[in-house]
Image (cartoon, rainbow, N blue to C red):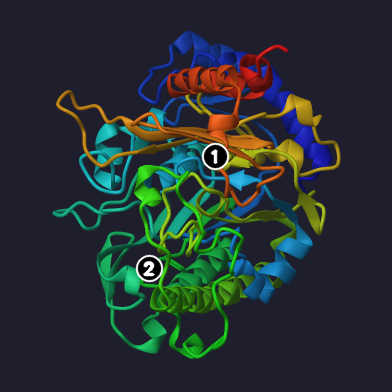
Amino acid sequence: MPNENSLNRLGLLYIVAGALALILISCSISLPTSLLRSADEKGISLTAAADVIVVPDIERPNILFILTDDLDAALRTTDYMPRYNDLLVEQGVSLQRFFTPTSLCCPSRVTFLRGQYTHNHQVFMNTPPAGSFQKFNRSGEEASTIATWLDAAGYRTGLIGKYLNAYPFPKNKTYTPPGWTEWYSPAKGKPYHGFGYTLNENGTLIEYQEDPEDYMTDVLAQKADRFIRASLEDTRPFFLFVSTFAPHEPYTPAPRHAGDFPDIQAPRTASFNEDDVSDKPSGIRYDPQLTEEEIRDIDDVYRLRVQSMQAVDEMIEMLIATLEELGLLENTYIIFTSDNGFHLGQHRMKPGKAHPYEEDILVPFVIRGPGIPAGVSVDDYLTGNIDFAPTIAELAGVIPPDYVDGRSLAPLFGENKPPLDEWRQAMPLEFFGHELDESGVIEPEYLGVRTAEFLFVEYSEGFIEFYDLENDPAQLENIADQTDPELLEALSEWLSDFYACAGENCRMLEDEFISRTWPEE
């Protein structure tokens, strides 16, 4: 059974194999016979097709990954999910500073799959030509994801639910990406509405209607349950990716939950319907305050979002019960998070995402499993979805490709955490427009950096935001005009370097942030 000691042992194996990892540059590389022979002599299995090194002779755990869609952390929707809190939060480790650097579905989901910042995987938006499933597929990047990495390590892999925006191809509804043993993803219809959709079920299109038993989250839960139960006959470890559409717009709850929580309101945070937005960027600066009717609409949206998450909460209980029944729970990591956050009335904004503020970039993250202590909150370390893929790789005994920008979070799950000053000191943020320019390039709408102390954002038109998060966590007062110009210039230069970084260079920039940016007194 994997535990903290086995994770440490795996880390040593990573060091032994690390030199060989440097040779694996891209998923299309062809490894020379001499290298394969040398790796075999050293007892290290190299898998060129997946561009990874598979660490040999270790026990590989099962991994259940539940990814929700637009679930907030700052607005505390998960407070209304008792099973999530009892079975995950109280039984695992929660990361309180887990961010999605690009607060938008498709770019964020590709980051989960590959561990890269958006400027490196270049799936910039949800729609073509700048983004979408088609952009990801045509780039060739589907050939190297957590699915192919774990497939190379002998895992039975499954994706159940939402994949990437605009999946599948218009003329090929049964396409399954590389690396997935089993595949159940909507191919047409209205999956966001929860009813009236068609699933691609391992190459067969199955229609679901408008009956209560066709409710999307429940169907996904049942298929996930069957996938797990198949472990009785297939002894391979499994990686199961369950991707819900809840609580995404139109926020459809299961019929049985449609009357729940009739009196709840959206949280009236300090920035809700903010009095003064004159210091905000142009897209917000001229917005009028929300009307009473608009606030009632926001309350309705919040209630629907909470209602839609009740079926997800029940799914968590169901799958954990199945794992326990089958004797698999003690050897299974369960991870829960979201692709991005969501705002509801903050800074006068109507429901949405894509901004650099806390509500949009901060998401829940919790993990339970072998060697993971129960009921622990990790508050101070900056983490994000770029770290998910390398974390899964380490738990599964795989050394990921050099293109990965993130880092494994495994050191934060045990008692012997690295010193805080030896961890990431800055979380970069980036968001892109919808259109490519004449040269086929897309420029960022904003670049930003979120640290433990402040948020700095630079917009394409030159506008700057700077917030002192220790004294102004709600990001009410933009103090850019009161801040040392040398610091602002240093931050801008750091962001320019970040926008050009890749792989290890990104991690070095994050680690050296303080020394690189803070002007000497």
Residue that badge 1 annotates: 389
Task: Name the spot of residue 388 as percent of width and height, x first.
Answer: 57, 42
Q: As drawn, which residue projects farthest toward the right? A: 415
Label 1 vs label 2, nearer the camera: 2
Residue that badge 2 annotates: 249
The disc, 1 or 2, on the residue closer to the chain's N-terminal end is 2
Choose between 253 and 186: the one closer to the eye: 253
Image quarter in which the C terminus is found: top right
Task: Name the spot of residue 87 as percent of width and height, x first.
Answer: 72, 68
- Classify residue 449 by image quadrant: top right
- Image mark count: 2
Choose between 420 and 215: the one closer to the eye: 420
Q: Considering only vertical position in the picture, is 476 above or below 24?
A: below
Choose between 366 and 350: the one closer to the eye: 350
- Disc 1 crowd rating (10 Å Cα; few below 14, some 14-19, many 20+) is many
Name the residue: 57% across, 15% down. 20
Q: Could you tell me if residue 434 is visible in this image?
A: yes
Name the residue: 51% across, 51% down. 156
Q: CA distance from mark 1 to mark 2?
A: 27 Å
Choose between 504 and 368: the one closer to the eye: 504
Task: Name the spot of residue 72 as percent of width and height, x first.
Answer: 54, 60
Name the residue: 61% across, 18% down. 517
Q: Considering only vertical position in the picture, is 343 above or below 135?
A: below
